[in-house]
Amino acid sequence: MQIETQYSFIDGEWHPGGETFDSINPSDTSDVIGRFSVASVDDCDSAVTAARSAFPEWSLSGLEQRKAILDAVGAELIGRSEEIGTLIAREEGKPLAEGIGEVARSGQFFQYFGAEVLRQMGEFAASVRAGVNIEVSREPLGVISIITPWNFPIAVAAWKIAPALAFGNCVVLKPAELVPASASMFADILARSGLPDGVFNMVHGPGNVVGQALVANPNVDAISFTGSVATGRHIARAAVENMTRVQLEMGSKNALIVLNDADIDVAINCAVNGAYFGTGQKCTASSRLIVEAGIHDEFVERMITATDALVVGHALEPGTQIGPVVDGQQLNKNLGYIQLAKEEGATVATGGDKLRLVTNGYYMRPALCVDTSNAMRINREEIFGPISSVIKVADFDEALSVSNDSDFGLTSGIITTSLSHATHFKRHTQSGCAMVNLPTAGTDYHVPFGGRKSSSYGPREQGQYAKEFYTTVKTTYLSA
Ligand code: NAD
């Protein structure tokens, strides 16, 4: 069967590129989802130029025009969430329900920022000088490069693009090369949304060429990136070279603390959800389970049973709870960490092996490692797979100290019935998001999201905090 090549979207047109790459279904590697042409460095520069040319008009566009477009994009995403969610499940490998949920959530991001368009209030101040008044207002930045990972193919792009457009900026999106079909479907919605040509552009291709071209271009005013720490570090350096504003959301090693006084059912539900759903490929996944000694053995026993009961399968198969790993490279990386866990002296209490199912996909059984210490590499490095480690601790103080002993600080959680411990944890946990009696994964769309330490760099994303990144402040002094 002839596979039609899909293009990048530049200045209002679908634009053919050079060589092509295929998107493969990780649940069934015989299923080629699409073929995509790689944008050249010149194409990337054209996209930035188109965005720059569109900026003067878009930055001054009427608020109702912007709101109408954002609302319509949101409504289309929500209305087509089943169809687009199916594509995400097929391309990324998350179970269908999670794919549908991601698309509906992406629609909510657009609708939320559609409402924010009408809430752009400035401030007024009296001056220390008689007869002078002061206004503090916000203005859009210009051209934003948006570089996204594969694990939430549409949601991460949506939570960046919606505020960028709402506040009057133009965008060039560079989606991850593992999920170009989902990105293209999303781009098609934006292409038909009534945005003037050049306001939204998308370029396909590898990060070290296409992403790099967007990062290196001095006509880009800001870069919003989500991905690994290594790439983020590189982007930050390049951004400083051009004095470009930058926001980075990166890796994690999130801890879930389980105290002796925890409701064990809540603990197991939160741990299984946080550690394994989305095949553990969430930046908010609970990869370290820090468990107080008194509940440790019961927790481990119940976790083994719950983990073994998870249904691993084709993302589109009804009943599948855990889909495949995203690709062969990530699967090998996961299996390598299982081997390392054993070498470091941990016990793999269950799972961690490759699974052969009816279709040829990148399947593995979710793994629970026990007898681990926080010094082990499996507890220090981000794995990004369905692998979780139990670390036994003597008491709450040790639990908190182990939880905070990490290079990362995105989310953290505690399962406890003690108000005093929950309150102390909330104040002293060194993470951007803190969860009490909830999984470490799962956040709302109208409040800030981000982390500390190596997990994040720059202003927070989402909610009203998004304007800190997507606008610049002007202080005007007026004398009558
Ligand atoms: P990655 O860093 O490999 O790639 C992310 C994006 O950067 C891709 O689009 C890639 O093509 C691009 N890129 C790669 N090299 C580049 C370069 N030199 N210049 C510019 N762009 C470049 O990450 P990934 O494997 O796609 O995603 C997994 C990572 O994302 C994990 O570390 C995960 O924790 C993180 N993540 C973080 C959050 C968060 O909000 N903190 C959310 C989702 C994923």
Image (cartoon, rainbow, N blue to C red):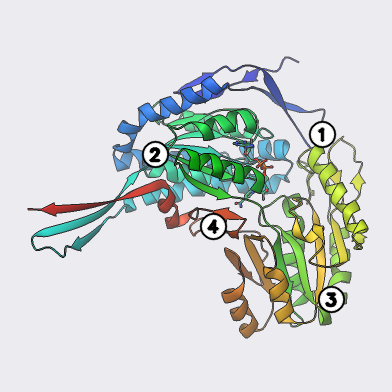
Element at label 2: loop
At which x and y percent is residue 345? 92, 63
Looking at the picture, does residue 250 appear above or below residue 253? above
Q: Distance between the residues labelled 2 and 3?
A: 51 Å
Q: Distance between the residues labelled 4 and 1?
A: 34 Å
Q: Is residue 352 visible in this depiction of the protein? A: no
Q: What residue type is labelled 2?
A: Asn
At which x and y percent is residue 378? 81, 58
Q: Is residue 207 visible in this depiction of the protein? A: yes
Task: Point out which mark residue 449 bears.
Answer: 4
Q: Which amino acid does label 4 sit on?
A: Phe
Cβ–Cβ under 8 Å for marks 4 and 1: no
Out of 250 and 439, give the one closest to the viewer: 250
Residue at point 88%, 54% (across, down): 340
Q: What residue type is labelled 3?
A: His
At which x and y percent is residue 262? 73, 79
Foreground: disc 1 or disc 3: 3
Left-right relation of 71 to 364: left
Q: How far apart are marks 4 and 2 (CA)?
A: 21 Å
The numbered mark, 2 or 3, whose residue comes first in the sequence reads 2
Task: Point out which mark residue 28 bears.
Answer: 1
Task: Point out which mark residue 234 bears.
Answer: none
Corner quadrant of residue 426: bottom right
> Ligand 1 within 8 A of label 4's CB?
yes
Residue hosting label 3: 296
Q: How far apart are marks 4 and 3 (CA)?
A: 31 Å
Element at label 1: loop
Q: What residue type is labelled 1?
A: Asp
Residue hosting label 2: 169
Query: The N terminus appears in which quarter of the rendering?
Result: top right
Residue at point 47%, 45% (across, down): 110
